[in-house]
């Protein structure tokens, strides 16, 4: 069981699907071509992806080999499967293929998203369900390990998130000029002198200004999820 589960540890994929993009918009000054269509290059970043994943229900014990492969959808499990990648999905999934694999490229092992069929592929049941929803097919199930699961890391992750949110702002200073500047600020709270070369200065957080559309910050990520799911389908 351990060897099978270890083999399924892949890590995160890092890739450039489109190696070159050219923008064309009024913000480019003289480089803007009014005749051509307006085009922007957008940089998007997902925050706290690991923290989000660690709040899910995770394996806690009672690992067992399962022989009734037909029931895998109804129990928490890790499977070893052969997957088929239908050719009709290749154009749609070309920029972001499902089920990345560790492959040897020029003598170096790399995690490669690709459109090939997968043999002896180890995958968590929730991830496999998503792959099937997005069009992949199970050709064969070789092995199946069931387990009990609980969101046992969720409270710890949320605790760390709240601690970061309510953190104390402390500056370590070894310069007299900078020390006097911080002490003179209206948000100065306390200082601790370690020696004549080092001082810790605690400052209060300045009053936050809620002048941004926080409601959009809540709504947009939900909309983004639906867009990504539609893109894959």
Image: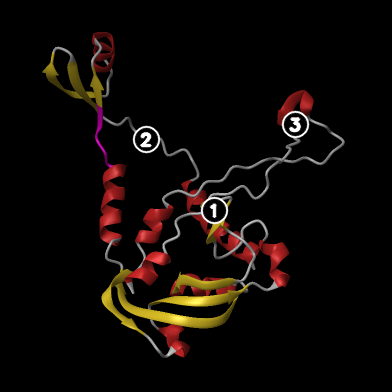
Quarter of image, res 185: top left
Of the image marks 2 and 1, the number of the one nearer the N terminus: 2
Do the CB atoms of the residues marked 3 and 1 lie less than 8 Å apart? no
- Report the span colored magenta: 166-170
Q: How is the image coloured?
A: secondary structure
Residue at image coords 54%, 83%: 140
Where residue 181 appears, x then y in whole percent? Answer: 28, 13
Secondary structure of the residue carrying numbered label 2: loop
Discs 2/1, front? 1
Label 1 neighbour load within 10 Å: few <14, some 14-19, many 20+: few
Looking at the figure, which quarter contains the C terminus?
A: bottom right
- Distance of label 3 from label 2 (alpha carbons): 34 Å
Depth check: give the residue in front, 89 or 113.
113
Residue ID for mark 3: 26
In the image, which disc is placed on residue 208?
A: 2
In the picture, measured across the screen, residue 134 lies left or right of residue 102, that is right
Q: Is the magenta stretch mostly helix, strand or loop?
A: loop
In the picture, measured across the screen, residue 44 lies left or right of residue 196, that is right
Residue ID for mark 1: 220
Q: Is residue 167 magenta?
A: yes
Residue at image coords 74%, 41%: 39
Secondary structure of the residue carrying numbered label 1: helix
Secondary structure of the residue carrying numbered label 3: helix
Residue, far top: 177
Where residue 26 appears, x then y in whole percent? Answer: 75, 31
Of the image marks 3 and 2, the number of the one nearer the N terminus: 3
- Distance of label 3 from label 1 (alpha carbons): 26 Å
Label 3 neighbour load within 10 Å: few <14, some 14-19, many 20+: some
Q: Does the magenta stretch include residue 13?
A: no
In the picture, measured across the screen, residue 71 lies left or right of residue 139, that is left
């Amino acid at each position: 069981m351990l060897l099978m589960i270890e083999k399924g540890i892949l890590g995160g994929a890092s890739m450039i699907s489109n190696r070159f993009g050219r923008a064309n918009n009024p913000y480019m000054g003289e480089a803007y071509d009014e005749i051509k269509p307006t085009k922007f290059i957008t940089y998007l970043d997902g925050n706290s992806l690991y923290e989000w994943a660690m709040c899910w229900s995770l394996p806690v014990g009672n690992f067992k080999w399962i022989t009734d492969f037909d029931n895998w959808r109804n129990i928490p499990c890790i499977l070893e499967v052969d997957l088929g990648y239908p050719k009709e999905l290749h154009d749609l999934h070309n920029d972001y293929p499902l089920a990345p694999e560790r492959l040897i490229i020029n003598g170096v092992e790399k995690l490669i998203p690709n459109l090939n069929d997968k043999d002896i592929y180890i995958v968590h049941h929730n991830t496999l369900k998503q792959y099937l929803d997005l069009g992949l097919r199970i050709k064969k199930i070789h092995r199946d390990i069931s387990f009990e699961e609980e969101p046992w890391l969720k409270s710890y992750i949320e605790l760390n998130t709240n601690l970061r949110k309510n953190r104390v702002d402390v500056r370590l200073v070894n310069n007299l000029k900078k020390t006097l500047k911080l002490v003179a600020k209206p948000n100065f709270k306390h200082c601790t002198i370690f020696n004549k070369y080092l001082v810790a200065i605690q400052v209060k957080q300045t009053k936050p200004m809620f002048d941004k559309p926080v409601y959009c910050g809540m709504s947009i990520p939900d909309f983004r999820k639906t867009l990504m799911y539609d893109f894959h389908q």
